[in-house]
Amino acid sequence: MARTNEWAGKVLALIKGGNTSAAIAQIKVAPSVKDLKALHSEMVMARLTGRWRDVDAAIEDNLALLAAPRLHRSP
């Protein structure tokens, strides 16, 4: 079995602790799409989706932003 993602676990701990503003700030600077998907799947397994709509919206928005192709590339 694959090792759980440390970043997702830490953000999930923030969410469970009730510090949703810090969790949203971490979600906005997520390292990768893989990390966001890991967080989302951990929230589903813990049955936390839907409890904090702002957290769910932040995950959805940042998944779309990270998955979208970039408009330009640096030289």
Image (cartoon, rainbow, N blue to C red):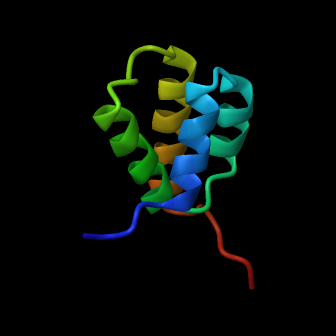
Against 45, residue 2 (above or below) is below
In-front residue for pair 44/33: 44
Residue 50 lies in what quarter of the image? top left
Give the left or right position of residue 23, taking residue 5 as reference.
Answer: right
Q: Residue at x 46, y 45 (%)?
A: 64
Q: Position of residue 22 (x, y in %)?
A: 74, 33
Count up the numbered dots. 0
Q: Is residue 56 above or below residue 50?
A: below
Asked whether 31 or 70 is in front, the reply is 31
In this rendering, does residue 35 appear at all? Answer: yes
Residue 39 pos. (x, y %): 45, 45
Question: Which quadrant would the C terminus be assigned to in this image?
Answer: bottom right
Residue drawn 33% across the image and 44% down it: 41
In the figure, 9 relative to 73: above or below?
A: above
Among the 4 quarters of the image, the one containing residue 13:
top right
Can residue 68 be seen here? no
Say which residue appears at 54% left-offset and 39% top-offset: 12
Residue 56 pos. (x, y %)? 47, 26
> Residue 67 vs residue 45: left or right?
right
Q: Nearer the viewer, residue 46 or 58?
A: 46
Q: Is residue 45 left or right of residue 33?
A: left
x then y, percent, for residue 34: 43, 61
Residue at horizontal 56%, vertical 31%?
58
Residue closest to the far bottom: 75
- Looking at the figure, which quarter contains the N terminus? bottom left
